[in-house]
Image: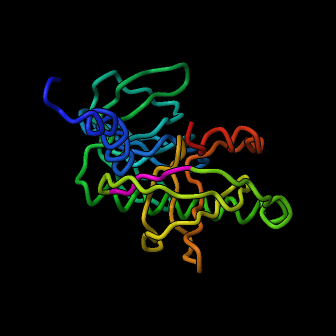
Amino acid sequence: MQGQPILKRMEDPVVAKARAERRRFRRVPVDLAGRLFLPADSREAVCKVIDMSPGGASVLSDLMPEADAHIVLYIDGFGRFEGVVIRRDGDGFGVRFSGTALKREKTAEQLTLYMNKTLVDSSVVVRQNDRTPAKGMSQFVRADGTIVKCEVIDLSPTGVSLRTAIKPQVGEFVLIGQLAGRVARQHEDGVGVQFVGLTSETPSADTLHASIMVR
């Protein structure tokens, strides 16, 4: 729009994406048992959640609710969720959670812990042996939309070490390049970021490098 600063026009989509990531990170694969309850007719059944985000989930169950149906999910280790069915697909369905921002933030923290445990259980050797130097300029977007320039020090399939004068607190979620992450530690030169929301298939070093570097 005329009169709007060029820099602001360039940053707006990035800031908007970062703010969206605060509330709804990309779906992460999970394998969680649960129970499904349909308040409309008091039916219930066991179910399995196969992917999840703070904003919704994909569920497999013999009990198939109608589209737009209101449901209640009890997910092992995560608690109770209310939501609306937004799609049906084969033996499963997608649900969009309804809840407060605080509930979404708590779910994001639970998912991060779940993913970190999965990574610890399955990728300890990869983290120890596959961290390689990967110099280059990048940037990350903080939860408040602030864009911070940084330099990549080294990179692994599960995280990245960044040189930056601005060091977010441990636990803060950030968006670096095209990947969501969580600040796992602070060090002398900057911070270490743990990726969240990656699929179980380990990305190649080239793929990760292309995802986080500034083009």
Image point 49% across, 51% down: which residue?
139
Image point 46% across, 71% down: which residue?
167
- Specify the farthest residue to the bottom: 188
Image quarter of the N terminus: top left
The total number of labels drawn is 0
The image shows residue 211 at horizontal and vertical percentages of 61, 40
Up the image or down, 104 lies above or below 56; here it is: below
Q: Nearer the viewer, residue 45 or 15?
A: 15
Q: Nearer the viewer, residue 126 or 193?
A: 193
Q: Where does the magenta region start and end? A: 138-143
Horizontal relation, residue 180 to residue 7: left or right: right
The image shows residue 47 at horizontal and vertical percentages of 51, 41
Horizontal relation, residue 166 to residue 156: left or right: left
Q: Nearer the viewer, residue 214 or 50?
A: 214
Image point 86% across, 63% down: which residue?
129
Within the image, what quadrant is residue 130 found in?
bottom right
The image shows residue 88 at horizontal and vertical percentages of 44, 21
- Coloring applied to the structure: rainbow
Decide whether residue 79 is among the magenta residues. Answer: no
Q: Nearer the viewer, residue 126 or 15?
A: 15
Within the image, what quadrant is residue 41 found in?
top left
The secondary structure that most of the magenta stretch takes on is strand
Image quarter of the C terminus: top right
